[in-house]
Amino acid sequence: MAFSDTCFTNQFLIAMPGLSNPQFHHSVAYVCEHNEDGAMGIIINQLLNLKLGEVLSQMNIAITSPHIKEQAIYLGGPVQPERGFVLHRPSTQWSSMLQLDYEIAITTSKDILSSIAQGKGPNNTLIALGYAGWGPGQLEKEIGQNAWLSGPANESILFHTPSEQRWEAAAALMGIDLNFISNDIGHA
């Protein structure tokens, strides 16, 4: 399938109720990159049983800002679950930072975690392990099969909405109540 003119970068992907893959059940993914080579996103509503304090301790990063010890860590997706990603409001330039739009950036370098541990990092962060990936044309095909809804990303949902409310909140941005969508397709 050829790359379409529709770009899903900086969009939310909202898993439809009938999406059969259990890894993505009721997921919301923030699409960081989408081009002819495929797409990469971070799931923003699947919490891991892991806190930032534990991750920083494993990385031998000293914590001088104790309130961050309890910050949640998300399962960003099934690809490379050992790799960390920080979605954040751009404020400072970090070593491996990619500004995705004027409100959101992604960083994969250790320096941002050191700054967060010292209380000097960005005010709004979402830290995830792993990412969701789609090969060339795969995301377009899945959207065409009604596995995902796509809609505008929203910084408030990403950083301030409780994770268990993000699936419905992201759909509500498009005026959709997911409680009224049936899992049965093509039946009257």
Image: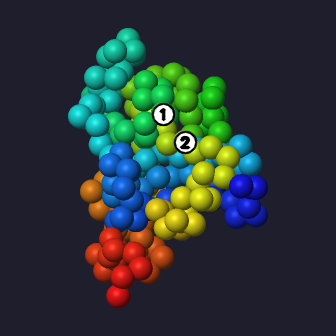
Task: Give the color scheme: rainbow, by chain, secondary structure or one colour.
Answer: rainbow
Compared across the picture, whether 119 is left or right of 85 comes to left
Residue 138: horizontal and vertical position, in percent? 60, 51
Label 2: few (<14), some (14–19) or many (≥20) C-alpha neighbours in 10 Å: many
| Residue 123 makes an appearance in the image | no
Quarter of the view holding residue 63: top left
Compared across the picture, whether 148 is left or right of 138 comes to left
What is the spatial separation of the Cα atoms under label 1 and label 2, in whole angstroms?
A: 7 Å
Identify the mark nearer the N-term, 1 or 2: 1
Q: Amino acid at mark 1?
A: Val
Say which residue label 2 marks. 133
Q: Residue drawn at (30%, 43%), measured in percent from left and top?
A: 47
Q: Residue drawn at (71%, 43%), measured in percent from left and top?
A: 37
Compared across the picture, whether 86 is left or right of 44 comes to right
From the viewer's side, name the closer residue of 120 and 53: 53
Q: Count the marks.
A: 2
Contact? badges 1 and 2 (CB < 8 Å): yes
From the viewer's side, name the closer residue of 13 and 18: 18
Q: Amino acid at mark 2?
A: Gly
Q: Which mark is residue 79?
A: 1
From the viewer's side, name the closer residue of 12 and 67: 12
Q: Quadrant of the N terminus?
A: bottom right
Dot 1: element: strand
